Image: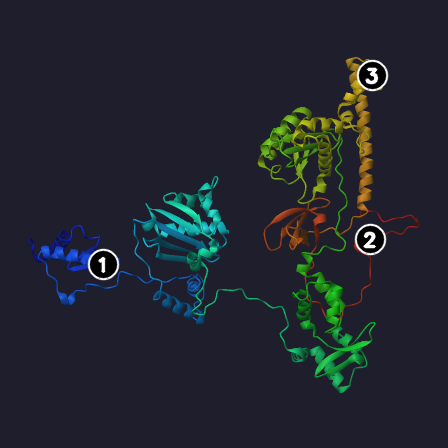
Amino acid sequence: MPFGLCNAPGTFQRLMERTLSGLVGKSCLVYLDDIIVFSATEEEHLTRLEEVFQRLKGACHHTRGDRDRLTKNSGSLTVAHTPLREGGPLHELTRKGEKWQWGPRQEGAFTTLKNLLVSTPILGHPDFSRPFVLDVDASDTAIGAVLSQTMENGNQVVIAYISRALTRPEQRYCVTRKEMLALVWAVKQFRPYLYGQKFTARTDHNSLRWLRNFREPEGQVARWLEQLAEYQFDVVHRPGKQHGNADALSRQSCKQCGMGSPCQAISLNAISCGGENMIKQWQEDDPEIQQVIKWLSTNSWPDKAPEGSRILKSLWAQRRRMKMTNGVLTREWETLGTNKKTMLPVIPRARVPEVLDLIHNHPTGGHLGVAKSLEKIRQRFYWPQQREDVEDWCRTCDACASRKAPQAKARAPMQIQPVGYPFQRIGVDVLGPLEETKRGNRYLLVICDYFTKWPEAFPMPDAEATTIARHLVNGIFCRFGAPETIHSDQGRNFESALIKELCELFGTSKTRTTAYHPQSDGLVERMNRTLVDMLAATSIEEPGEWDEYIDRVLLAYRTSVHHTTAATPSRILYGQEVRLPVDLIYGQPDGKPQQTTSQYIRQLRQDLERLYSDVRQRAGMEQKRQKDWYDKHARGTLFEPGDRVWLQIPRNSKLGPNWEGPYRVLKRLDGCTYRVQQCRGKKKVVVHFDRMKPYAERVPRSTRVQPERKRQPPARLRDAMTVTTDKNYRIPANT
């Protein structure tokens, strides 16, 4: 041996590898004088041992029988399910900032995991000549996966189990994203088994079957799909009842160890069962009631009502009805109409919120109104000023306020938007979707001029901002010029960057309605209803051809006298009436005199000036008439910055809330619109006064005696009151 014995290990290793050439890595492993022969079955093991011994015999190598272990069941590994919830208490201790505290929960989880590691099931060896099956599942808190194979005898053998807890951001994923995360993570963990192999991924979430059909995926989903593109697999849906292997890793807890699944603590809004003993203890802790008990037991009532406390003063005034019953101060109560007398325990002021919460807020209370809640209380308890407390409690109950409407809903006075000439201000709206026509149109872009009431309507296949912008430019700006103001609702197509840039380019101001308040664009909304009725009646025989009739319907409207202007939109816009088919058949009633161009222009100018003046006057009178009628029902006090309010929201379900809040008023934008912000968030919205109501904050009621105050009328009425002898005088409507 060259260079002596220092190279003996390397030389001997090469000798052994040459002796067992072709077997290393396939049926055995060798390191110097140690040989490990592995196999899946006993018969296969004996065959491989014989082959190794033949090689050693041929190379004249000898083994010592006393040190050889020919058969040992060390190739089968025992691995147990490790549901994340079993180790949940241990995982909690590893979180950042978590206080280390080893208690019964942690000890139980540790013992459970140790038992699981030494119990069934038994895992099998992977056979790369057979396809793999990957079962994945996700729950609210964890994800898990099972890698298995189906053998020749049809039995399914588990190769490996994996699972992990979801991080806090991952727990906020939607269900589909969680299931997709489980698949991506499992494929990554089992990459040595699955890479280059075709396998089947099974899930109980049917949406993953269309995993590769995402249209234009972005962000995280796109990155996940890119990772999965390296593998060749099919996604198969398996019902949840048959998907228990993977589901157990992410959801189920161990039943043998006695550890249950995590559950929410249920808070019972009830007074602990104590009966008279509990009320007696309450009274012993209250100094005011103790004073009354002292007066009652010694029969030494003061001659004059005590000063300072309203409660003590009220109890003193009812001293003739006070009695001690089983050591509890009670008050005699007589039910009207029945002459039935009941002794009711006196509840201390500090315990009143607890009783009110049980009577009103508890599910058995049902959040009923003042009358029913007060009647329940008067049948069981007594304390001074019960009605005021019940009214205040019901008024400041957030659950009631979020659901129930006020008795008198707020309504702001009508706001007038004056206009003086054609196409100074136009309103736009999208009507649809309607029945699709043969030309593919499903929507109508409806535009109406506030001065002339001239309507325009353009059929559209879609309601995209690009389509709307094209019709605005070609149908309005290029024919009538750019208006000063365009008014619309808060649709995304009207609030898009394209429409805003278009308005800036033409010097047009863009305004919008407040959310869920279409009254702000009433002209177009009313025009929509008229158009639908006219189209339905005109195209009744061919409802799928309504876009063929739209121009004729518009002609009928433009040549009809409008109630507000007392003239047709065509006459106000062009200075003359449009010839209709009926005029061609029967002729026009009055012939027009022949005029030169200059005479016609002069006459047209005079006619338009007179017509515009009449329209402005009539429109002003009509607006005033409508405002006077509308403002008769206006009610409510305007809000100031800093006030807290409820915001009315559209009802998504019959059991959903109708009001959301509280919001804080930031600014009053105009007569009846406000910018408000969530008190518990950063959300800011612009809302109309009609969708708001005051927020009543619950504060402890004072028990001190308040100085008497003279009653005064509300500020709005007080400011409007003047000394007058006119019997017909009325308070102004706008005050």
The residue that mark 2 highlights is 717
Please identify the quarter of the rendering in which residue 611 is found. Answer: top right
Comes first in the chain, label 3 or label 2: 3
Q: Secondary structure at mark 3?
A: loop
Labels 3, 1: front one: 1
Q: Amino acid at mark 1?
A: Glu
User: Which comes before the other along the chain, label 1 or label 2?
Assistant: 1
| Along the viewing direction, whichever of 674 and 459 lies nearer the viewer | 459
Residues at marks 3 and 2 touching, judged by CB atoms closer than 8 Å? no
Q: Residue 593's spot in the image, x, y percent?
A: 83, 14
**Secondary element type, mark 1:** helix
How far across and down, in percent of the image, does residue 299 sit?
78, 86
Q: Can residue 298 be seen in the rendering of this structure?
A: yes
Residue type, label 2: Leu
Q: CA distance from mark 3 to mark 1?
A: 117 Å
Which secondary structure, mark 2?
Answer: helix
> In screen coordinates, is 64 left or right of 302?
left
- In the picture provided, is 305 more to the left or to the right than 32? right
Q: Determine which quarter of the picture holds residue 60.
A: bottom left
Amino acid type indicated by mark 3: Lys
Q: Nearer the viewer, mark 1 or mark 2?
A: 1
Q: Position of residue 146 (x, y in %)?
A: 38, 55
State the mark number for residue 43.
Answer: 1
In the image, residue 562 sits, relative to residue 656, either above or below, namely above
In this view, which residue lies farthest toward the front? Answer: 153
Disc 3 from disc 2: Cα separation: 59 Å
Which residue does the numbered mark 3 point to in the structure image? 592
Whether residue 459 is situated above or below residue 185 in the rendered picture: above
Q: Are marks 3 and 1 in contact (CB under 8 Å)?
A: no
Query: Label 2: few (<14), some or many (≥20) within 10 Å?
Result: few
